[in-house]
Image (cartoon, rainbow, N blue to C red):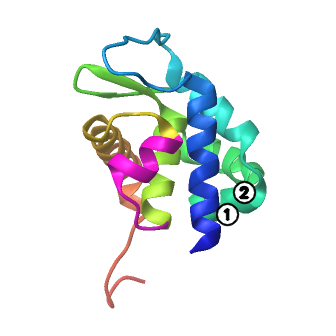
Amino acid sequence: MILQMGVMLTAAAIHTSLYGGRQAGVQEYRPRDHTVKRFHYITSTFNDYVWGIFFRFTRPQLFELLPLLGIGLGDWIWAGDHKCYAPLAFLMVLCRLSHPRTIDGDMFLIFDVVGGRMNRFIFAMMLWLHDKWSYTLKFGLLCG
């Protein structure tokens, strides 16, 4: 519990240092491709222990897994009118599946994406993974 609180405080400090904190009524400048910058920031900042807690994979394993799943480093996921960097959306999926976290609290501090939009990105990535790889899944006793 104490370790998780320390990790979350670290994520909050990273978020504040990266985006300068939020003030009411102040519109921040945010570049259009901030999800790409966020992905590279996450992959370069967190140590391997934190990666194990949040994503259940290490950085080298992630970069081996992305091409195997067909997710390129230049790919984007569209959810309605919004787009997200596909590797970051995959990290959102891994983070959501690895441990029960609240979208608006814990995951917002890590990914800096609003909760409803994050849900749409996770859903879009899961739908894409299902469409691409569902033929390889076999469930039940009669599958062999």
Q: What element carries label 1?
A: helix
Question: At which x and y percent is residue 95?
Answer: 49, 55
Task: Tell me, yes or no, if residue 74 can be seen here.
Answer: no
Q: In which quarter of the image is residue 119?
A: top left
Question: Of residues 83 and 136, which is closer to you in this image?
Answer: 83
Q: Residue drawn 49% across and 43% down?
A: 109
Counting other residues with Cα less than 10 Å from the Cα at mark 2, is it few (<14), some (14-19), or many (20 or more)?
A: some
Q: Residue drawn 73% across and 40% down?
A: 45
Question: Of residues 91 and 124, which is closer to you in this image?
Answer: 91
Residue beneath label 2, please? Answer: 58
Residue beneath label 1, please? Answer: 52
In the rendered image, residue 105 lying in the magenta stretch gets the answer yes
Q: Decide whether the magenta segment is chiefly helix, strand or loop.
A: helix
In the rendered image, residue 48 lying in the magenta stretch gets the answer no
**Type of amino acid under label 1:** Gly
Question: Of residues 16 and 53, which is closer to you in this image?
Answer: 16
Task: Tell me, yes or no, if residue 75 can be seen here.
Answer: yes
Q: In this view, does 4 lie above or below 18?
A: below
**Type of amino acid under label 2:** Thr
Q: Residue drawn 46% across and 34% down?
A: 112
Span shown in magenta:
99-110
Q: Residue drawn 53% across and 46% down?
A: 91
Q: In which quarter of the image is residue 140?
A: bottom left
Pointers 1 and 2 in contact (CB under 8 A)?
yes
Which image quarter is the C terminus in? Answer: bottom left
